[in-house]
Image (cartoon, grey):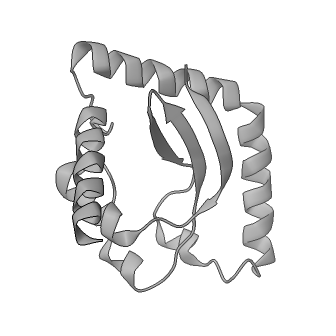
């Protein structure tokens, strides 16, 4: 069963994001992430033995206006989005679990969905590389 770890702001390692994008182009990456720390608003969900980040904000330019938590309009928008997501968190969890399970059972990856097996293999490869570099 899928379980939420946390709703919140997360910064994602640009190197890892780029690495995942090279493995699966449905994992969005933009080179501009290297020039500015852009928080992603989303959910961490535990699926099987892996943790997945489900973004609740898009990577569009309007979401890059974050200024050290000082932009009151953006903070207000986040709080409203957060409150809404809390009201539908069971639907989000059920949908994520259904997509994950269906993909794992059928080995079919629908358009616009990341390939979970590919991402899981990429994670293992990433961790092995990091371990060798340490």
Residue sitting at x 60%, y 78%: 65
Q: Eyeballing the image, is 37 above or below 131? A: below
70 relative position to 102: left or right: right
Q: Quadrant of residue 71?
A: bottom right
Q: Eyeballing the image, is 98 above or below 45? A: above
Residue sitting at x 47%, y 30%: 47
Q: Eyeballing the image, is 132 above or below 51? A: below
Residue sitting at x 24%, y 55%: 128
Residue sitting at x 30%, y 21%: 103
Indicate the position of residue 132 as horizontal and vertical percent values: 22, 65
Indicate the position of residue 125 as horizontal and vertical percent values: 22, 51
Viewport quadrant of the C terminus: bottom left
- For this orientation, the residue located farthest to the top is 105
106 relative position to 72: left or right: left
Indicate the position of residue 91 as horizontal and vertical percent values: 63, 24
Q: Is residue 110 visible?
A: yes
Q: Quadrant of residue 45?
A: top right
Camera-side residue of 46 and 112: 46
12 relative position to 105: left or right: right
Viewport quadrant of the N terminus: top right
């Amino acid at each position: 069963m899928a379980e939420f770890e946390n709703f919140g702001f997360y910064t994602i390692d640009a190197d890892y994001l780029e690495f995942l994008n090279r493995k699966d182009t449905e994992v969005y990456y933009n080179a501009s992430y290297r020039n500015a720390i852009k928080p992603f608003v989303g959910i961490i969900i535990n699926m099987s033995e892996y943790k997945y980040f489900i973004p609740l904000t898009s990577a569009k330019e309007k979401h890059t206006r974050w200024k050290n938590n000082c932009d009151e309009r953006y903070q207000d928008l986040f709080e409203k989005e957060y409150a809404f997501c809390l009201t539908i968190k069971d639907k989000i969890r059920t949908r994520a679990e259904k997509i994950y399970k269906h993909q794992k059972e059928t080995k079919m990856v629908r358009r616009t969905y990341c390939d979970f097996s590919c991402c899981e293999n990429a994670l293992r490869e990433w961790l092995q590389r990091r371990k060798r570099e340490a």
